Image (cartoon, helix red, strand yellow):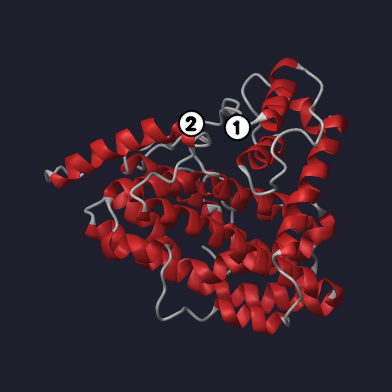
Amino acid sequence: MSVRGAVVAGAVPSQASGERPLAEQVVSPPLPLPRGSLSEGVVAALRDGAPPPPAAAGDPDPWGDDLQLALHTLYELHYRGFAGVDPDLEWDTRLLGLRGELERRFLGAVRDELPGSPPVDEVIGELLVEPVDGSGISHHLKADGRWWQMQEHLAHRSVYHLKEADPHAWVIPRLTGRAKAALVAVEFDEFGGGRPERMHSELYGRLLTGAGLSRAYLAHQNSAPAPMLAVVNLMSAFGLRRSLRGALVGHFAAAEITTAPSAKRMAAALERMGAHPDCVEFFTEHVEADAVHEQVVRHDVIGDLLRREPELTPDVVLGVRATELVEGRYGEHVLGAWARGESSAHGRGREQAHGQEQEKEKGKEQGQVQG
């Protein structure tokens, strides 16, 4: 059952006989490859026990590879951690202090690009209107995208979708009443309605396998560009700060409201390319689910939250606008690289990733649909 059904009853169902076993194991990923002196210092602190680097080390660009990877690495301690890294470092005060300073720089840069605070109804209303001349990644892939571009985009998004609903769960103990109940109902769908094989992260894992890509958690972190890391870092920052619970709800709303139209285009693009049905299933699931979630999030989550805590209105607006900002920067980066005939992957992983994608493209052009 789900928010589209009725009340959840009974225990979580076990995996039925004949169903595919879950392929994913809970394994901590390896540490990422550094992208500058700051991220190199963070990796050394986790790997070797070296003192954390000063926040001023490395490239000062808050949107750049070095800072975004450093933040990504520090945030990941609150998710699955890294292989060979002491899990107690999650609460190391020196690392927390460094993360806090980098977080302030990143969120400061986000706020600098979003002056003012429009009315919340206006901001939510804008999410509901799709531009007639849309030009995002899903539009490109649906119209005339190449298979290697599709693979590259799916690999980048794995950094997000393999933990899709997890950061939003941090807001649950910070809500109450209808807002809490409604958000949990939507999260219940995200986590598969009690069926592990239907968790959206599991569906994305099967998508990756169907696309000929590794489904291992953070397998693609070294090729993910800085704008993609920023997308995930934003929701981690909102999720870990109770003071930004309103922003996390805004992020949640933006994600749920805008997903269905984009998912419909992605499903059409994958069908046009002859992709494996597991690739298409992830997006068709979101077309139906998120169309319903949009109503619940708008009226029951945001509406109830702001009735109880109207002072959080600017933060909800920030969450919506910031989500659109980082997703827009990611889209511009990817489409810009493709327009130049280049891979959008980070430099360290670009040659290998692009070579594999070109081999897949060659196979598809010869009529060998991946399975």
x and y percent of residue 47 in the render? Answer: 69, 19
Name of the residue lying farthest toward the left = 366
SS at mark 1 in the image: loop
274 horizontally vs 172: left or right: left
x and y percent of residue 250 in the render? Answer: 69, 67
Specify the quadrant of the image occupied by residue 135: bottom left
Give the residue at x 40% y 59%. 283
x and y percent of residue 251 in the render? Answer: 65, 63
SS at mark 2 in the image: helix
Which amino acid lies under the numbered mark 2 shown in the image of this protein? Answer: Arg
Which amino acid lies under the numbered mark 1 shown in the image of this protein? Answer: Arg
Q: Is residue 124 above or below residue 11?
A: below
The residue that mark 1 highlights is 35
Give the residue at x 33% y 60%. 141
Name of the residue lying farthest toward the top = 48
User: Of 22 and 324, which appears nearest the observer?
Assistant: 324
The residue that mark 2 highlights is 348
- Pointers 1 and 2 in contact (C-beta within 8 Å): yes
